[in-house]
Image: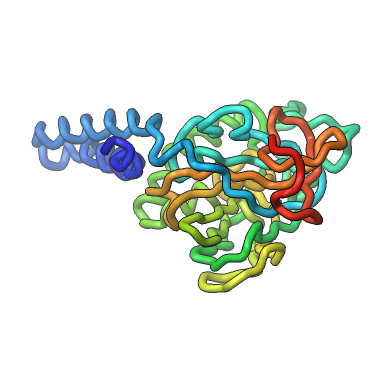
Amino acid sequence: MLKKIARFRTPVLLLGIALGLSMNLHDVRAVFYAGTFLVVLGLVLFFVPAGASDREPVVVRSPLEGRWIPVNSPADKVPSHGTHEAGQTYAIDLVYAPDPAVEWKPLPGGRLAARPETFPAFGRPVSAPADGVVVAAGGRQRDHWSRNSWPGLVYLLVEGMIFRQIGSFLTLSSCRFILGNHVILDIGDGVYAVFAHLRRGSLRVAKGDRVRAGDPLGEVGNSGNSSEPHLHFHLMDGPRPLVAAGIPFAFPYETDGELRTGVPGGRRAFVARTDVPAGDGARS
């Protein structure tokens, strides 16, 4: 029962905030207390998994090609982003790092912000990891400057946790402003793939389109709640992130000269392999 309720953690939290803030309009203390209860319940539910955590990983094709750094990986911790919200229990952030001689740092210092075009990930192609049908696609949000400095990170957290959440809830857009430009793909068997923070104007698909594994979906961007250009990818058990539960995934990749099928982690660079069947390689 608690896991089912946990799917509605964000609506519960935002409804509680709305009821609490409405106190000045009606002066009914019972409504204020109800709002307070919902806020506390919503915060507690953020730490409750909304689905079965023992499901076997769904093996897919890598949505990217080239050398990448895994950040906030489920190989390192679960939930990977510190919350089960939006079906992202097993989500991963992938940062393009084509040059082994250049060390990637989450907070490099030296500048407050930079244009998205200055990052190597910006504009990298994103492809379908399996055959499927597009159930959601949005590509009009702007690609903002980076927020990978301490002041930028604080701004990112406040904006993302408050204003973007409220905006998504009020427009009934199921995390639209958190995901930024995005594609949600139904890959069958109750599994949906999410691709977030895509480049404005880069989407190659629209809602209702059928795609094959490897077909282009769009390009890596810096839209939504993003610190720098990267791809946010995860699987979930429903088409609406606001009430979905995360599903583990695996894909082929190469690290230290060894071909694996699993999830890269430890912020260790890997090479995404799209030229091998999805099940090949040692399990990791």
**Residue 276 image offset from top left, x and y in percent:** 79, 54
Q: Is residue 167 visible?
A: no
Decide which of 54, 245 is in the foreground and name it.
54
Q: Is residue 96 above or below residue 267?
A: below
- Whether residue 107 sits left or right of residue 273 in the image: it is left
Decide which of 88, 147 is in the foreground and name it.
88
Decide which of 223, 256 is in the foreground and name it.
256
Q: Quadrant of the N terminus?
A: top left
Image point (22%, 30%), residue name = 36
Count the marks.
Answer: 0
Image point (42%, 39%), residue name = 52
Colour approach in the figure: rainbow
Q: Quadrant of the C terminus?
A: top right
**Residue 77 image offset from top left, x and y in percent:** 57, 28
Image point (38%, 32%), residue name = 48
Q: Is residue 196 above or below residue 148?
A: below
Q: Is residue 166 above or below residue 190?
A: above
User: Which residue is the extreme one toward the bottom?
Assistant: 209
Quarter-wise, where is residue 114 in the image?
A: top right
**Residue 16 image offset from top left, x and y in percent:** 25, 38
Q: Is residue 32 above or below residue 63?
A: above
- Whether residue 239 sits left or right of residue 58 in the image: it is left
